[in-house]
Amino acid sequence: MEMRIALLGCGNVGTRLIRLLAAKDEALRHERNLAVTISGAYTRRAGGWLAPEGLTPATLAASGWPEGAAPGAGIPDAGQPFSGDSVTFARTCPADLLVEITTLNPVDGQPALDHVRAALSAGKHVVTANKGPIAHGLRELRALAAAHSVGLRFESTLMDGAPIINMMEYCLPVTEVISFRGLLNCTSNYVLSLMTDGMTLERAVAEAQRAGVAEADPSNDLDGWDAAVKATVIANALMGADIRPADVRRVGLGAEGMRQANAALKPGESLKQVAEGRREGQAVIARVSLQSLPPGDTLGSLSGMETGVRLLTDTMRELTLIEGEGDPTQTAMGILSDIVNIARAYPQA
Ligand SMILES: NC(=O)c1ccc[n+]([C@@H]2O[C@H](COP(=O)([O-])OP(=O)(O)OC[C@H]3O[C@@H](n4cnc5c(N)ncnc54)[C@H](OP(=O)(O)O)[C@@H]3O)[C@@H](O)[C@H]2O)c1
């Protein structure tokens, strides 16, 4: 089976995905009878190109695209320039499946939400690592996918592609998630561990930036927005809720939150940014807060860049998934697994 994919966004994750597809090309063909080619791509700075026949991942990896990132720069051999906007690209690119990997907008998920809408409405499968459209539009997007008989998958929106959504869907059918509790944002917890060792918030953030753990503007992480968006994805995807990130109560690493959390901290405990959610009647209530976790609490023992989530379910009771230091190749692996699962579910693609 052949699957032509197009990339909307190609930064850290996209470049790793191209390399991973190239490295796994033979295995995909032999073990899964799946030939993945890339028939177009678009980024904000480099613009877009189309290759309706599809380039092999190895050809695209060798081209170095999108290095240079000037408009139209480095269009790979056999590619034609695409001159429309990103939503038009999502709708019209000659692909079976769109991989949406543009930047997260936690406030309203745009323009990625429109990218996903446009692709699904045009009868393309969608795989995304972008939490924005899933946190802000999952119910609508699932209905759109069903109406157009296409797949929508988003494993890499949580824990860099560690298989939490696929685990629930494929391994634990008809299982209900009653509650969840997790350390979902590694930047905050890295900063908190440095502060537990006595650093001020400012010094800890500077150290996290120096170590490449925090972005130049880490406010989405430290204010709890990133964790709130992930909590929304878990609530909506695994618990059937329809909440938005703004519905998640948040206490970030600001002065008041830190004062209260430090006052509650007992010897031996560790301070963590915890995202959690639980059913309350028909609703799911989620929050992000600073909590002091006692020794022996598995989540409390996570350090450095580790993330983890504990699900309380009605069939398997507690399940805890821990991911070691994540990187964009793991995120790319989550996307690859979603592509394979869509190919399996829609063999006519
Ligand atoms: N990095 C990870 O390990 C990881 C883990 C889990 C989830 N994710 C999610 O995966 C997505 C991609 O992450 P990343 O690390 O690859 O980000 P990145 O390196 O910042 O790359 C983002 C890409 O999206 C493009 N882009 C942004 N806005 C666009 C727009 N409006 N139209 C077209 N292209 C646009 C950028 O183009 P320009 O470069 O030309 O501006 C760039 O190619 C994000 O949503 C992120 O939250 C990432």
Image (cartoon, rainbow, N blue to C red):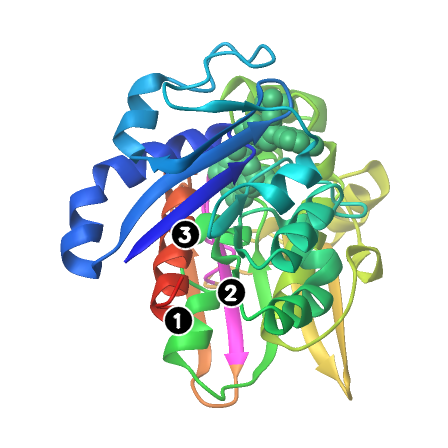
Residue 313 lies left or right of residue 167; in this view the side is: right
| 283 or 151: nearer the viewer | 151
**What quarter of the picture does the N terminus occupy?**
bottom left
Q: Are marks 2 and 1 in contact (CB under 8 Å)?
A: yes
Secondary structure state at the residue bearing disc 1 = helix
Residue at 16%, 58% (x, y): give it.
31
204 displayed left or right of 253:
left
Rendered position, 184 above or below 56:
below
Residue underneath mark 3: 334
Q: Nearer the viewer, residue 71 or 313?
A: 71
Quarter the C terminus occupies: bottom left
- Residue that numbered label 2 is attached to: 151
Q: Nearer the viewer, residue 262 or 311?
A: 311
Residue 139 percent location from the top left of the image = 70, 70
Query: How many C-alpha atoms fall within 10 Å of the one at disc 3: few (<14), some, or many (≥20)?
Result: many
Give, as a three-letter code, the residue at label 1. Answer: Ala
Quarter of the rendered structure image containing ligand 1 = top right
User: Going from the N terminus, do you reach mark 3 or mark 1 first?
Assistant: 3
Q: Is residue 163 magenta?
A: no
Q: Which mark is residue 345?
A: 1
Which residue is located at x 49 percent, y 89 percent? 174
**Image quarter of residue 149:** bottom right
Decide: few, some or many residues near mark 2? Use Cα within 10 Å; few <14, some 14-19, many ≥20. Answer: many
Q: Is residue 222 visible?
A: yes
Alpha-carbon span between mark 2 and mark 1: 8 Å
Q: Amino acid at mark 2?
A: Gly
**Residue 182 position within the rendered picture, expressed as x and y whole percent measured from the top left:** 57, 60
3 or 2: mark nearer the eye? 2
Magenta-highlighted residues:
298-312
- Magenta: main secondary structure equals loop
Task: Please name which of the two marks, 3 or 1, marks the residue nearer to the observer.
Answer: 1
